[in-house]
Each structure stands twice: as structure tokens, then as C-alpha cells.
Amino acid sequence: AQSVTQLDSQVPVFEEAPVELRCNYSSSVSVYLFWYVQYPNQGLQLLLKYLSGSTLVKGINGFEAEFNKSQTSFHLRKPSVHISDTAEYFCAVQKGGATNKLIFGTGTLLAVQP
Amino acid sequence: ETGVTQSPTHLIKTRGQQVTLRCSSQSGHNTVSWYQQALGQGPQFIFQYYREEENGRGNFPPRFSGLQFPNYSSELNVNALELDDSALYLCASRTAGSGTEAFFGQGTRLTVV
């Protein structure tokens, strides 16, 4: 079975500082990896995804993530955050197959302070 | 191109009642999934429909059921509501296939009292 661990429930950071949100996954088979963002009272929006190929993936809003197979990690980074980046961030894995369900971590609240 | 829309946005029900939540999938998407997101948690997979057939189910009891219609819109029905069913219910639509992007609606906030 697959699982996702987001090590930090909350990450406070000052505006214009860099940030890294950590995600580790567990799976005995190859999986696809995703990062979603959820703003207050909203659904989920895809930031980026890793399917195959280059391990450095660039997404929307200046975010990027690096897939590390040996460490089973998919950490999300942004070199300079804005107040508007304040939101809940979810890492998810998806195993190929008929269902393709997403398995989510518990989320990390990114709190950007002025 | 319209996105995924869910109705209603908020709902309050009494324990033991039944509820139906609705989802209109994005144009061109034939697969709809439902997720339950309890407060402070990540979304949990309930089930998925592909071309009107359920083709995957998470660890939820049978009182959670669903439908998908020929236009690929979907319903989630929950019978005998319990207090723990209070959550944000998210619908996601996508095209079939591995690694395809799931587009989420804004969710329905269900409160059971």
C-alpha cells in the first residue's frame, strides 16, 4: 500500500524568504507524485506533478519540486514567497491502474508573514 | 470551458438523516472521484466512477453510495448520517488514464448535528 508523510504541519516564513515543504512517500511500486494547494474555503489546485523523466519539476506560481527515488522524497520549494502563498499544501501519490486514486498527506500550512 | 462545480456549498443535517451532494464534471472528463476531507486532514478517497460504473472504492461503509449520469455528472449519497460524517466533500474529474490531472470542485461543507 502507498502512504504519504508530510513532516511539518505548519511552516511559518517571512515574505521574500525561501521555503521548502517536505514530503516523503512509501510504495513498493512506481508511483506518480503531485503537489496540490488549497486556499481557505476552496478546493484543491494542482501545483505540479512528476510522472517520469527529469527529477526537477517546475510548476505554477514559481514552485518547483525534486523527486528523489533513493530517499523516497518529493520536497516542494520556492525561492521567494509572497503573502498570497499562504495556504495549505498537500502532497499526494497515485499508483497506476484502473482506479488511479490519489493518496494524500495530512497537509502543511504555509504561513507567510510580512 | 467550465470547471468542476459542486452543490450545495454548505449543508447542515441531523444525525440519522440522508444527504445527496452533486457534482458537474469538467467538459470532456469521463471519470469522477469523491473525497472526504475532515478538518485538519488530507482528503480521503471515497470512490470513483468511470462511464457510469463504480471502478474503485476506498475504506468507506456501504451507506456511502454514488451515481454517475450519462453526461458524467455525479452524485454522492450518504445514508444514516453520523456526527463523524461532518467534513468537506470534494469532487474531482479527469480523463481516464494514469497520471492525468484531477480537477477539483470547491467542495460541499457538510455539518451533521
Image (spheres, rainbow, N blue to C red):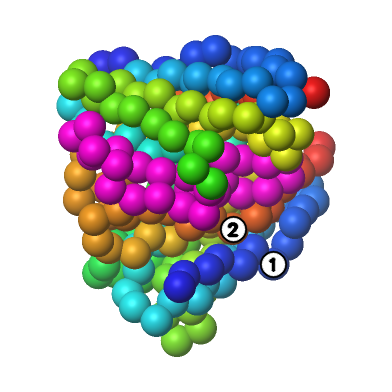
Query: Chain letter of disc 2?
Result: A
Cα separation, mark 2 vs mark 1, equals 9 Å
Which label sits on residue A105? 2
Dot 2 and dot 1 within a common chain: yes
Q: Residue at x 68, y 48 (%)?
A: B41
Mark sitting earlier along the chain (2/1): 1
- Residue sitting farthest toward the top: B8
What span is colored magenta in the figure?
Answer: B35-60
Q: Residues within 10 Å of mark 2 (few under 14, many from 20)?
A: many
Q: Secondary structure at mark 1?
A: loop
Give the answer, above or below, for where B91 lies relative to A7. Answer: above
Front in this rendered view, residue B35 or A48: B35
Q: Looking at the image, is mark 2 or mark 1 nearer the viewer? A: 2
Q: Position of residue A97 (x, y in %)?
A: 24, 61
Dividing the picture into quadrants, the one containing residue B17 is: top right
Q: Residues within 10 Å of mark 1 (few under 14, many from 20)?
A: some
- Quarter of the image for the N terminus of chain B: give it: top left
Left or right side of A77 for B86: right
Q: Which residue is mark 1?
A: A7
Which label sits on residue A19? none
Instruction: Please tell me how many numbered marks the rendered image carries.
Output: 2
As shown in the figure, which amino acid type bears the numbered disc 1? Answer: Leu
Does the magenta-highlighted stretch encompass residue A89? no
